[in-house]
């Protein structure tokens, strides 16, 4: 069975967005600071990163079989127009099904319960890993003992405020194991941790 | 001329203390999880850490020539009984000189202005580095363009709240350069950054 992971670009002071949704240019600068092309399922969304990050991201894309996302991320992205950039099925955690959904041409499922959402994504992933985003959903998975790994792309940056990756962690303090992998690169340090202290 | 650096043990979610001053056992576990002895000027304060951390800390102790500390840290430690654990002169940033100080037997100076404090510490350091602690003083140095490097001992831990290392950063966002050094170890990852964006 695959793992359940969450991943984010995070500033050294722990934020995945700066004040008033600022800072994304800096947090995601490493997606565009190199000459290695990483393509997504969306032709207009093509990244140019340095070698180490590109190799890691290509490996991750291959390893991930499905996603669980929150309703906020679904709404923000407009459901990615019906197709996740990594071309994978998506389970949306939502108390209501949005107008016009589900669509026969889009592999999106709507589930109200986080546990059921992860279980459904596991089935859809066919043995591959399940990615959970954003922070609120990741936190719910952590609290429910469903999260296996946390992948942080640590950006050399102080945002000074904004949206923390890990806010209102239930059962804190939570001990992690690792990092079991460290990939240094230009403008980012990839750190991967295992969740050891299941509630 | 030496550098001005600040250093702290920080949880992955950015805290140097948990809620209600908790979490120190976890944040400083790496000071006691190995068999390499690191001695300080205080016989009762001897650390037992793993090899990589011990080598790094011994190098740091040798490189640091003086400290600038805030009044809160001075009061919390009782002025370390008149002798800093690393046996170095200390400049205390304080609007008032505490009762009984300065003492002829203790190399502690009291200065009300952060800029003057760093300048005095530089003189005392004799070309070696100056360490500034805690977070409030480090932040003041950062805001005043006096900070050269940030050393983070990143601990695999989510504290979920408490005292952020970098709170209320003036002139945020602040871009950093690095990490120029990464030292992985048991229970801690040492990451060292340069401050590039001087205000």
Image: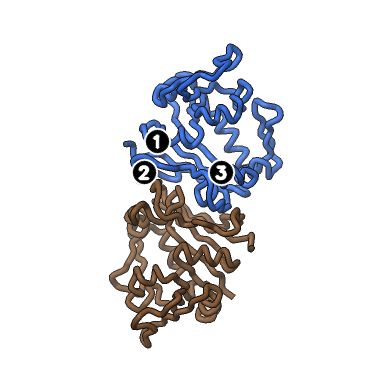
Chain colours: A brown, B blue
Name, please, the residue furthest toward the bottom.
A104
Residue, far left: A44
Give the residue number, with chain letter if any, for mark 3.
Answer: B17
Q: Is residue B126 visible?
A: no
Can you say which quadrant of the picture contains the N terminus of chain B? top left
- For the residue labelled by badge 3, is the local secondary structure a helix, a strand or a loop? strand
**Are the residues at dot 2 and dot 1 in contact (C-beta closer than 8 Å)?**
yes
Instruction: Name the chain letter of the residue that bears numbered label 3.
Output: B
Q: Chain of mark 1?
A: B
For mark 1, give the secondary structure.
Answer: helix
Instruction: Return the residue at label 1.
Output: B142
For this view, does B83 lie left or right of residue B126? right
Locate the C terminus of chain B by quadrant.
top left
Q: Position of residue B192 (x, y in %)?
A: 48, 42
Task: Pick whichever of labels 2 and 3 is earlier in the sequence.
Answer: 3
Kindly state the secondary structure of the residue where label 2 is placed: strand
Q: Residue furthest top?
A: B104
Residue B8 place in picture, x, y as percent: 53, 39
Within 10 angstroms of label 2, few (less than 14), some, or many (20 or more) residues? some
Q: Is residue A98 above or below residue B137?
A: below
The residue tagged 2 is B174
Residue name at image x 47 percent, y 64 percent: A136
Percent from the top left, x then y, of residue A153? Answer: 45, 56
Q: In 3D space, how far apart are the residues under numbered discs 2 and 1 (Cα atoms)?
A: 9 Å
Where is B66 relative to A108, above or below?
above
Point out the tag, 2 or 1, that comes first from the N-terminus.
1
Task: Determine the CA span between mark 2 and mark 3.
Answer: 22 Å
Q: Earlier in the sequence, mark 1 or mark 3?
A: 3
- Relative to A71, is A180 on the left or the right? right
Query: Quarter of the image holding residue B122?
Result: top left
**Is label 2 or label 3 in front?**
3
User: Residue sitting at 63 percent across and 63 percent down?
Assistant: A198
């Amino acid at each position: 069975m695959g793992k359940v992971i969450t991943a984010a670009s995070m500033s050294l002071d722990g934020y995945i967005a700066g004040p008033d949704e600022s800072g994304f240019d800096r947090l995601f600068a490493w997606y565009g600071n190199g000459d290695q092309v990483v393509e997504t399922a969306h032709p207009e969304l093509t990244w140019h990163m340095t070698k180490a990050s590109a190799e890691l991201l290509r490996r991750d894309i291959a390893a991930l079989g499905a996603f669980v996302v929150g309703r906020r991320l679904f709404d923000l992205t407009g459901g990615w127009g019906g197709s996740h950039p990594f071309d994978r099925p998506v389970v949306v955690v939502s108390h209501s099904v949005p107008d016009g959904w589900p669509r026969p041409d889009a592999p999106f499922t709507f589930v109200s319960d986080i546990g059921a959402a992860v279980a459904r994504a596991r089935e859809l992933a066919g043995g591959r890993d399940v990615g959970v985003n954003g922070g609120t959903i990741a936190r719910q998975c952590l609290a429910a003992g469903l999260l296996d790994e946390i992948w942080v792309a640590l950006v050399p940056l102080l945002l000074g405020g904004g949206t923390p990756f890990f806010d209102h962690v239930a059962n804190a303090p939570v001990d992690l194991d690792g990092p079991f992998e460290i990939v240094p690169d230009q403008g980012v340090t990839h750190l991967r941790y295992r969740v050891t202290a299941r509630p």
